Image (cartoon, helix red, strand yellow):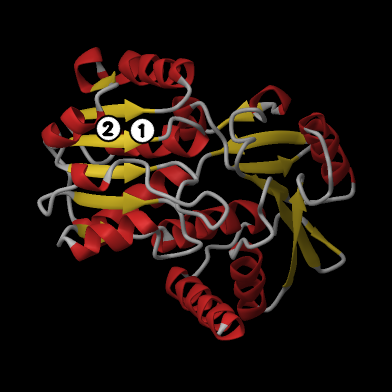
Amino acid sequence: MNGIGQGRVLTGLAGRGVLQSRTPWMHEQEADAQGFRLLYALFDFTDRNWSDDALPELLAATQKVGFAGLNVTLPYKQAVLPWLDDLSDAARGVGAVNTVQFADGRRIGHNTDVTAFAGNFRAHLGTAAGQRVLQFGCGGAGAATAYALLASLDVDEVMLVDRDAGRASELAARLASQWGAQRVRVVDDVAEAARRADGVVNATPMGMDKFPGMPLPKAALEPRHWVAEIVYFPLETELLAHARRIGCRTLDGSGMAVLQAAEAFEIFTGRPAETQRMADSFARFVARKAQEAA
């Protein structure tokens, strides 16, 4: 088994605002169910008052003490790339990493968001083949969802929106080089893009407790749209709540969270995770937190 030191696996999550993450619970509960010990640490750069420059130091320190690897989230999914030795095909294609594996003295970047988003979409919304999708967010998570839409869900066109115009253009160019310029473009007129779109993806942090609101005006959504979120705390974002009220088909971020965690678990431990058991663990955790908040 990968990463075992004295009978346990050490891993963790690097990012900002991650103290509410459900990932530690899912990983640790799954390891317990399989009969070994896994310790999952949260490295919240904001809570620890670390600068972004601490990322390579964290990688070096955790690798040195025997971690199996680290998950990486906002805002480091792309910033981590210069500090890695190799990339999986998915991570290379996306240009972003959410899982860093330490193996044989090397750091290998993976992207489990791609297969997780595609798998969750198929399970709950079916297929998006031949459709046009309006996506908000072109960071690390947005790169993965856009890649999944084009590569795995056979979307005809992805229309990208991001507050950072340069980031949106960079992602569009990367995707166009692989899938053709006719299948991806940056848009400025959100209302017009929504009228042309069959579905909407929110790949931004908007909807989280610390980033309230919706990425598009309520009036731009129509009942014919499907709406997919990557945010999973809270599960019911303002976007999803409004979409459900007007009759849209919706997809919350819980399934993606579970599937990306299951794939990362196997990368870290060498053992497949039982995804339904992980989903049940996730649901128990959410229910417990809801009771505590009541």
Q: Residue at x 34, y 38 (%)?
A: 148
Q: Is residue 241 left or right of residue 234?
A: left
- Inspect the image, locate mark 2, and give the three-letter code of the amino acid beneath it: Leu
Q: Secondary structure at mark 2?
A: helix
Q: Is residue 210 left or right of residue 155?
A: right
Residue 131 % position (x, y): 13, 37
Asked if disc 1 and disc 2 are in contact, CB closer than 8 Å, the reply is: yes
**Badge 1: residue crowd in 10 Å (few <14, some 14–19, many ≥20):** many
Residue 177 % position (x, y): 34, 13
Q: Which residue is mark 1?
A: 147
As displayed, is residue 16 above or below residue 53? below
Disc marking residue 95:
none
Q: Quadrant of the C terminus?
A: bottom right
As displayed, is residue 215 above or below residue 233? above
Q: Which residue is mark 2?
A: 150
Seen from the viewer's position, the closer of residues 154 and 224 is 224
* Inter-mark Cα distance, 1 to 2: 5 Å
Q: Secondary structure at mark 1?
A: helix
Seen from the viewer's position, the closer of residues 31 and 105 is 31
